[in-house]
Amino acid sequence: MIPINKPQIDENEREEILKVLDEGILTSASNLGGKRVQDFEKLLANFLHIKHAVAVNSGTAALHASILAAGIKQEDEILIPSFTFVATANSVACTGAKPVFVDIEKDTYTINPLDLKNKVTKRTRAIIPVHLYGHPAKMDEILEFARKYSLLVIEDACQSLGSSYDGKQTGTLGEMGCFSMYASKVLTSGEGGAITTNSDEFAEKLRMIRNHGMVGGYDTRIIGFNMRLPEISAAIAKTQMKKIQSMLHKRTINAKRLKELLTAKIANHDIVLPQENPRVKYNWYLYTVAFNTLRNRVKKLLNDNGIGATIYYDPPVHQTPYYSKFHNGDLKITEWASRSVLSLPVHPSLTEDDINLIANKVEEAIKS
Ligand SMILES: Cc1ncc(COP(=O)(O)O)c(C=O)c1O
């Protein structure tokens, strides 16, 4: 079986977890978090070249905390793509704000800057671009639009740790960036997340929000929750940070190899490969291709051969029962993508034979 993603766990994570158990301090309710939480935050902030990283216990919590820190209130509107994991929309909706769905671009599967102006209203307060599959959204146009309408930009970088746009890491371009360390992500702690920001004010609020709005003892200043990352998870995350470059490098090599094989075998057939451009660097969280007609046939043949090719996301959020009550306007490319995409594995554990097998089976399905 070739899974779509696989956590890269070795002796180093095991040792670090055992140290936490031996020391017996499993979490910390102090404002700054436990020892390993702080170590992880420093490593992440250094890697991203950003002032603050605030660790939390999921990517969803990272999004939720950022929306609270931004002071977004009931009836405020936030522009988000519908072509994303539902956590993006849930984090907005659970604050009482309204998610307003914006269409995506066909070449990146990320929010279409041109559609923002069709969806912005007097109530709009923020935009959450999602760097889906590790493909950076068109941040220069998004930031320019945000400036023009005085909107905050909170990046959903849950899938894009290590991707960059014009040389800057995703998650560092807007006011806040949100990362996930869920088990399938390029860097994992099992469950976990982090928010990054250059703002001292947001960082201070985020540290309170992850700890019930308290600053010390029970001195509760703002609304918050228990979003604390446990020390065992932080121990894993911290250890993973030390090998992030090599994990990303292996993904790049695998994606390059897969691209070469697919280009040589089936480029003129019904398949759209990821569109790379010199302004962006992908972390290759997933290698997502699209088919106008053959998607389900390719998926079945790959799955039948033990390859975990997976569809992210069908249906798109606006077509799920809860979110279909929101008025969405035209989301044509979102609906096309949802019918067409298929993600292929390129994670660091894959061998050259695995990559060859994936390409051969895609070719077999297309040509059969
Ligand atoms: C785009 C996106 N947003 C948000 C999340 C939520 O992250 P988590 O699963 O860590 O809560 C995920 C991860 O699954 C994601 O892929």
Image (cartoon, rainbow, N blue to C red):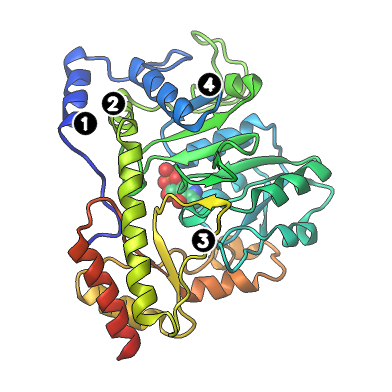
Q: In this orientation, does residue 352 appear?
A: yes
- At 27% from the left edge and 27% from the top edge, which residue is drawn? 232
Specify few, some or many for label 4: CA neighbours under 10 Å numbering under 14, 14-19, or 20 or more. Answer: many
**Disc 4 from disc 1: Cα separation:** 26 Å
In the picture of the structure, the residue carrying the numbered disc 1 is 13
Task: State the separation of the CA atoms marked 3 and 2.
Answer: 34 Å
Lower position in the chain sequence, tag 4 or tag 3: 4
Depth check, mark 4 against mark 3: the one in front is 3
Q: Amino acid at mark 4?
A: Arg
Disc 2 to disc 4, how far (Cα)? 19 Å
Residue on which disc 3 sits: 276
Q: Quadrant of the C terminus?
A: bottom left
Q: Position of residue 156 (x, y in %)?
A: 55, 45
Do the residues under discs 2 and 1 have CB atoms within 8 angstroms?
yes
Image marks 2 and 4: residues in contact by CB distance under 8 Å = no
Please indicate whether residue 146 sits to the left or right of residue 254 in the image.
Answer: right
Looking at the image, residue 206 sits to the left or right of residue 45; the answer is: right
Task: Classify mark 1: helix, strand or loop.
Answer: helix
Of callouts 1 and 3, which one flags the residue occurring earlier in the amino acid sequence?
1
Mark found first going from the N terminus, 2 or 1? 1
Q: Label 2: which residue?
A: 235
Q: At which x and y percent is residue 190?
A: 30, 39
Horizontal side of residue 175 vs 10, given as left or right: right
Q: Quadrant of residue 33?
A: top left
The one nearer the camera, 12 or 251, is: 251
Residue type, numbered disc 1: Glu
- Quadrant assignment for the N terminus: bottom left
Judged from the image, the secondary structure of the residue bearing numbered disc 2 is helix
N-term-proximal mark, 4 vs 1: 1
Q: Residue at x 36, y 69 (%)?
A: 260
- Residue in front for this viewpoint, 240 or 101: 240
Mark 1 vs mark 3, foreground winner is 3
